[in-house]
Amino acid sequence: MAREFHGRVVIGIMLVLIGLLFFLENHEPFNELIPSFIYKWEFFFILFGLLFFLLSRNKIAGIIFFSIGLFNLVPELWPLVFIFIGIYILIGFKGLKNFSFSGPNDNVEKDKNYLEQISIFGGGSKVFLSDNFKGGNIISIFGGSEVNLTGSKLAEGENILETTSIFGGSTIVIPNDWNVITDVLPIFGGFSDKRKRDPNQIIDTNKTLIIKGVAIFGGGEVKSTI
């Protein structure tokens, strides 16, 4: 099975490639060997989308970036958007109900251990219930969402919840007694931990939720119920 990387690794690779390209542009004879279209923003969107799609578990973010770059670089391909959306609806891929293109999307999911929440050009809220929560993915692209985990129980060991916020954001509400570590990389954005700790609260360190990811021109926050 191919190894999956977290979004922050993809960001790191992308920054290295961008720096390398601009470095080569300033030095002969490399500047004459590199095509000029590579330095257009559309190309970087395409490259970023491919990296996300191939290396990260957040395939949707990769598709969005790749599509924006490709359709702006080659405007004649815009009609394909409607074709792809139509095929997507007809086939009815699993998980279609998780998309939120506009308006609220309030729902409750029970007896699932992994969270999958995607908000694109819209937003909503979700109450997620699990007796053995093991993490998952939250993707917010030009939109936002709130996920309430207060009715869930954390699984043993380390559980990873990856967030990707691109021109959007997410709010995660967690139980007061969870041991939570935030490790989100902000790029022209931010991610804050707004939990209010009770000094008398007993924390089970054998169960840990690690929140990882990236916030690009977006952000998010972790809150508790107190």
Image (spheres, rainbow, N blue to C red):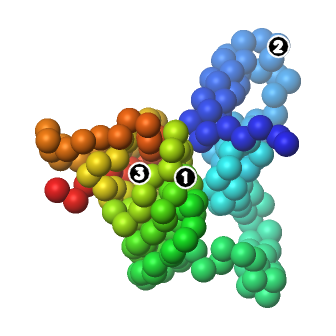
Residue bearing mark 1: 134
Residue 182: horizontal and vertical position, in percent? 40, 38
Q: Position of residue 151 (x, y in %)?
A: 37, 66
Q: Residue at x 45, y 81 (%)?
A: 107
State if disc 2 and disc 1 touch (CB < 8 Å): no
Quarter of the figure with the N terminus = top right
Residue located 41% across and 51% down the image:
218
Crowd band around label 2 with a 10 angstrom C-alpha radius: few (<14), some (14–19), many (20+): few
Taking depth in this image into account, of 126 and 31 the one nearest to the observer is: 126
31 left or right of 123 in image = right
The amino acid at mark 1 is Lys
Q: Earlier in the sequence, mark 1 or mark 3?
A: 1
The span from disc 1 to disc 2 (Cα, nearest Å) is 51 Å
Q: Which residue is mark 3?
A: 218
- Answer with mark 1 or mark 2, whichever residue precedes in sequence: 2
Name the kind of residue labelled 3 in the image. Answer: Gly
**Residue at 57% in and 74% down:** 98
Looking at the image, residue 26 sits to the left or right of residue 202; the answer is right
Q: Residue at x 20, y 44 (%)?
A: 201
In this orientation, does residue 108 appear?
yes
In the depicted structure, whether residue 72 falls above or below residue 9: below
Q: Which residue is mark 2?
A: 29
